[in-house]
Structure formats: C-alpha cells, structure tokens
Image: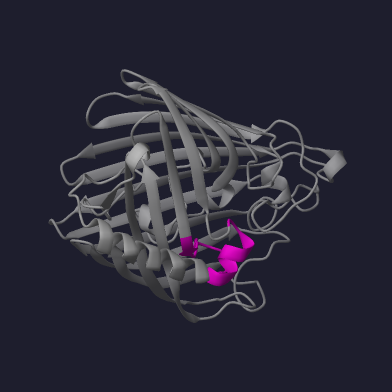
Amino acid sequence: MRSWVLGTAIFGAFALTAGNAGAAALSTPAMSGPLAANPNPISLDAGPLGTIYVDGVLSGLGFWQDNRVPGDREWRADLSNGQIFVQKTSGWFQFYVQAGGYSLPSLGTAYLTSGDTISSTFGAVPVVYARLVPIDSFSIEAGKLPTLIGDEYTFTFENMDIERGLLWNQEPAVSRGVQANYSTGPFSFALSWNDGFYSNRLNWLSGSAAYTIDGSNSISFIAGGNTGHTGYSSFTSPLAQNNGEIFNLIYSWTSGPWTVSPYVQYASVPADAVIGITHIASTTGGALLVSYALSDDWKIAGRAEYISSSGSLAAGQPNLLYGPGSDAWSFTVTPTYQHGIFFARGEASYVGVGRTEGGSVFGPNLDKTSQARMVLEAGVLF
C-alpha cells in the first residue's frame, strides 16, 4: 500500500511539472476492452533517454457471493488497482515499469485482499522489464514479464470481465525471464525462457505464433511447459501445474461494435516420482469471450467456459480442479460504462461443478457445487 501512495505522489509531481503532451494511447499494458486506456498520457522529455510516458489506474471493487469457503467473506470491498505505469516506447532501448497495489479476483477461488495479494504473489512491482530493439521487426526483453499463455490478462482493468475465468486459473500470470519477439508481415512470434508460475527457477519454455488473417480476424497458437522439474510449490506456483505443459489455440474476430474470441486449452502434468506425482493428469477446456459496444460510453461483455480434468481419486491422479476427474462451467456478464478516464462496471457470475470426487468445492463445509457472485468496480484510467 505504501508503494501505491508513493506511486501516486510521483505521478502527481510528474503531472504538475510535465503537463499533458497529447500523446496517443499506449499499447502497454495490454487491454482487451471494453475499457480503454487514457489516450493522453503524461509525457516527459527525459533528455538523452527520450520521451517517457506516465499513466495508471486507480479503482476499487465491492462484491457479494454465496457459498463462501472458510476464511472468505460474503460481502467485501477492496482496492482492485492502484497502479502507475512508467515506460519508454521508442528507440533501441525501451523499458516498462508497473508499480502499486492490485487484487486478482478469479472465478471459483477464494478472494485474496489486495494487501495479501501483493505479499503472496508478485510484489509491489508486479511487471518490470527492459527491452532492446535493434531493428523494428525484432526485440528482446528481460525482467518480470506478462505470460504468453491464455486469452485473459492478469489485472482487472485489462480484461473484458472483472474476474478472470476458470481457464485462467490453470495458467501462469507473471514470469521472470527473457523473451524474444519477431514480426514479419501478418506473422508474429515470441519465445520466452522463464520461471513458469513465478517459481524462481528458470526451467520453463514458452512460445507463441500469431497470424493476422485480415483486419478483422487473427489466430494464435501458444504453448509452454517445464523442461525439467520443480520440487517445491508456493501460492503462485502450484506443484502440479508448474511441472506440466499447457497449450492454447485462440481465434479473434472484430467487426464494428463486436469483439469475439473463442479459445481452447489443454494442459498436461506428467508423472514424476521425484516430486511425488505418480500418475499423469490433464485438463481440457474451452471459453468464449464476447464484447459488444452499445454506444460510445456503454458496452457489455460476457464469458462462457467449460473445463474438465482427468483421473480419479482411486487412481491417485493429482487434483487440478475440484478433485481428480472433476469438471466445471461458468457464465459471466459484465456491463461497462466509461466516459473519458472514468469508468464503472458491474458483473454477475456463476460457477457450477458437475463432478467432484475427493475435492474441496464451495460453502462452509466445502460441499456446495455452485457459487454466484455480484461485483461492482469503479475508478479512473489516468
């Protein structure tokens, strides 16, 4: 929290001294909509470094849920984002720094407060990296990097919905490592050597290949996996998933007010007696993300998902979902209002578990097979 206060104070000083240069909206951090970044971020003339841009987000959320798990609350209000972004986006040397407070609400999991999220996940500077750009088509970057995996980003303001989905729960979010990027014509590629689920062991290899079919259609294939084994776990590094491999096939279509993005995901965890996984296990899932612009200020987004896991408790497979062999589905609807830098959005979500064996689900006794939530989030993208 102190980092967020410091970041806000620094931003205020920049605003007073630098003024608004009327720059174009920045592409980092990535945002899938319906929220849009401030098209006029603060710009600073940093002498030999060139132009540095400063912007950020300040938002809070409140929510209600039924069938809360032990330790969670039925009602809650919290900071969802108090972050500042400082970046240099031109020249052969570039950098990006994202600092402050945040929470990471996701479907089907207990809510962790922003203070506990910072200390348990990626710290007060969750994303930071330096980038070298020797030519326009090629770059290499190193630091704490957003993952290549999945079709939803890490922070609430970046996504169509406030909460991330069930498929996102199987994916890494931020990884420490190095990444190379190359683009030519309609093709773009990225390859990263990193620590997967933030395990602090550089043994993951991730890559993506994307093809822009035309101005409305694109398709991407993404893969990542552990090249060795990691025999320990943490809050961000689940033992099974961090020792597995994961694949995505993502399609995106945009036309007028519509954005539609279906994707499928497969993840597998091999047997590895050295780390105590005696049987192979996997998850298979699919999701549909949709956003529609009702007007310049009003938009509505939605998500539908299904995911299943293999195995059974008797066979000794690891628990990747709600017990070995379990499956789950979700629906989410998120109407959004944004005018200038100010935004407000509500969300209704529902998670149902179809099969569960030997797993913890919802409710005080962990035996309820559904959970509904209502969420409100409001703030500014300055």
Q: Position of residue 81 (x, y in %)?
A: 42, 65
| Residue 265 is a magenta residue | no
State the residue lying farthest toward the left.
295
| Residue 117 is a magenta residue | yes
Residue 69 occupies quadrant: bottom right
Q: Position of residue 2 (x, y in %)?
A: 51, 71
Looking at the picture, the colour scheme in use is one colour
Residue drawn at (64%, 58%) of the image = 322
Q: Nearer the viewer, residue 28 or 96?
A: 96
Instruction: Tell me where the magenta segment starts and ends, as one range.
Output: 100-122
Residue 213 occupies quadrant: top left
Q: Nearer the viewer, residue 216 or 13?
A: 13
State the residue lying farthest toward the right.
274
Residue drawn at (57%, 64%) of the image = 118
Q: Nearer the viewer, residue 57 or 150?
A: 57
Is residue 226 visible from the viewing direction of this image? Answer: yes
Q: Nearer the viewer, residue 276 or 137?
A: 137
Residue drawn at (77%, 53%) of the image = 313
State the residue lying farthest toward the front.
47
State the residue lying farthest toward the top.
184
Is residue 348 visible from the viewing direction of this image? Answer: no
Count all numbered tags in the image, as a single digit. 0
Q: Position of residue 247 (x, y in %)?
A: 55, 34
- Is 183 left or right of 342, judged from the image as shown? right
- Is 180 left or right of 47, judged from the image as shown? right
- Is 363 left or right of 304, judged from the image as shown? right
Q: Position of residue 112 (x, y in %)?
A: 56, 69
Location of residue 185 with respect to 276 vertically, above or below: above
